[in-house]
Image (cartoon, rainbow, N blue to C red):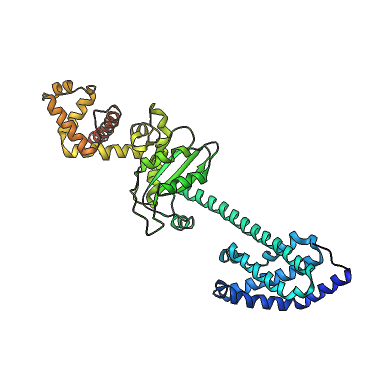
């Protein structure tokens, strides 16, 4: 800034600025009400807070005009006077509009004092604008860190199954737009994890995600996102396995396991349990695809002691077959015990091989698994073993003895 022609002239200008500071603040508030509709619509308390900020800015300019080296501190102090909720109710764009109106009013009132004062106002307004951007940037950074911690807390609650009454409100605070079915995807964290790219990919697929990084493990809670625009043409919803394939590049090397879909986000802990259990044993399947569904790892999970896998195998395979027909259970047992040989099964059961084929087809129709495939045969045999163990254990359990004591 060009220096004033003389210390006396500068002192006179400072004294004059201090005398008119109150009038400047009043004129600024009046101009704000006339030119900014959103300011006039604000509650009285917030309008008062904005007025305090404008008045602080005028007073700060006078101090800065006296000592330009105080710029970093004085400019920051303008916004320090504002209550915290003002940052949430006034956007950065609106703040810059406030600065522009204040500068315009001040320029009009000091125009008669020469170019030195006018140039000082322009220079100082630039510093204030930078200070405002810094305040909002720090607020956004703080909010981002808070959101990340909240998201980690929500994902952890889902994984542990310890959901409480506050979980829905926490999810809403994160801006979750998912609706309908939800599935959990578990894999490894890549060395250079780009969370923004993963979220962009999810948006393109029409899904919303909650992301949790737990050391080397990366967890995604996936839900179908609501359409943002009413005029959008309805798009075909991708199955969760296809969504997992599209998200796969965002994960690190290693296994990637997709839990079964559940009806809503509040039920996602069931999908998470299955995905985590599958991720823990995925290495036991030598040629496991990537991604692999947790239900395709039911035998490994059951052998590892996962009670959910055991229950799923019995309830989805053994009991439906048993309830449908004893012949189907006997045929499936024989077919699997005889190395999936139609002829050996037919000889054991004293039926024609075509009868065996028909019964195996009925098995596939009843439970959805095809016994002729090697992987599905393992799943079915595990289910038969678990189902028979449970049945036999119940059947052979001895009744408690009642001894009479003399």
The x and y percentages for residue 361 are: 18, 33
Q: Residue at x 70, y 70 (%)?
A: 56
Is residue 292 shown above or below 113?
A: above
Quadrant of residue 69 within the rendered picture? bottom right
Q: Residue at x 77, y 75 (%)?
A: 112
Judge left or right: residue 312 versus residue 38. Answer: left
Residue 229 seen in render: yes
Is residue 240 shown above or below 135?
A: above
Which of the image's four quarters has the N terminus?
Answer: bottom right
Q: Residue at x 74, y 71 (%)?
A: 59
The x and y percentages for residue 143 are: 57, 55
Q: How many marks?
A: 0
Comparing 277 with 122, the one in front is: 122
Judge left or right: residue 40 versus residue 365. Answer: right
The x and y percentages for residue 196 are: 51, 46
Q: Residue at x 42, y 29 (%)?
A: 283
Which of the image's four quarters has the C terminus?
Answer: top left
Quadrant of residue 300 within the rendered picture? top left
The x and y percentages for residue 178 are: 40, 53
Is residue 86 shown above or below 232?
A: below
Residue 158 seen in render: no
Judge left or right: residue 304 versus residue 86. Answer: left
């Amino acid at each position: 800034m060009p220096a004033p022609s003389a210390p006396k002239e500068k002192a006179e200008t400072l004294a004059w600025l201090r005398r008119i500071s109150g009038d400047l603040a009043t004129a600024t508030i009046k101009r704000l009400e006339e030119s900014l509709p959103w300011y006039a619509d604000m509650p009285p308390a917030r309008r008062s807070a904005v007025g305090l900020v404008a008045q602080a800015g005028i007073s700060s300019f006078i101090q800065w005009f006296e000592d330009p080296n105080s710029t970093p501190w004085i400019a920051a102090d303008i916004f320090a006077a504002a209550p915290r909720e003002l940052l949430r109710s006034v956007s950065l764009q609106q703040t810059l509009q406030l600065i522009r109106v204040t500068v315009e009013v001040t320029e009009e009132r000091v125009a008669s004092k020469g170019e030195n004062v006018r140039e000082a106002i322009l220079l100082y307004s630039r510093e204030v604008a930078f200070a405002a951007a810094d305040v909002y940037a720090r607020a956004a950074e703080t909010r981002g860190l808070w959101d990340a911690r909240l998201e980690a807390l929500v994902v952890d609650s889902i994984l542990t199954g310890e959901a409480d009454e506050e979980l829905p409100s926490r999810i809403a605070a994160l801006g979750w737009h998912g609706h309908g079915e939800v599935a959990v995807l578990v894999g490894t964290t890549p060395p250079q994890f780009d969370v923004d790219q993963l979220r962009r990919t999810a948006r393109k697929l029409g899904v919303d995600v909650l992301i949790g990084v737990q050391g080397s493990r990366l967890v995604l809670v996936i839900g179908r996102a609501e359409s943002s625009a009413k005029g959008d043409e309805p798009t075909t919803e991708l199955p969760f396995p296809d969504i997992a394939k599209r998200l796969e590049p965002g994960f690190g090397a290693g296994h990637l396991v997709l839990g079964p879909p559940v009806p809503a986000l509040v039920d996602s802990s069931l999908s998470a349990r299955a995905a985590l259990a599958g991720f823990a044993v995925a290495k036991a399947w030598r040629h496991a695809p990537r991604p692999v569904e947790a239900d395709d790892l039911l035998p490994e999970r059951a052998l590892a002691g996962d009670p959910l896998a055991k229950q799923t195998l019995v309830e989805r395979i053994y009991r439906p077959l048993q309830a449908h027909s004893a012949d189907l259970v006997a045929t499936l047992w024989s077919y699997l015990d005889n190395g999936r040989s139609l002829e050996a099964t037919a000889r054991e059961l004293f039926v024609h091989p075509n009868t065996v084929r028909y019964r195996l087809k009925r098995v596939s129709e009843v439970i959805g698994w095809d016994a002729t495939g090697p992987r599905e045969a393992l799943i079915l045999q595990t289910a038969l073993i678990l189902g028979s163990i449970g049945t036999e254990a119940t059947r052979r359990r001895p009744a408690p003895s009642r001894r009479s004591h003399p």
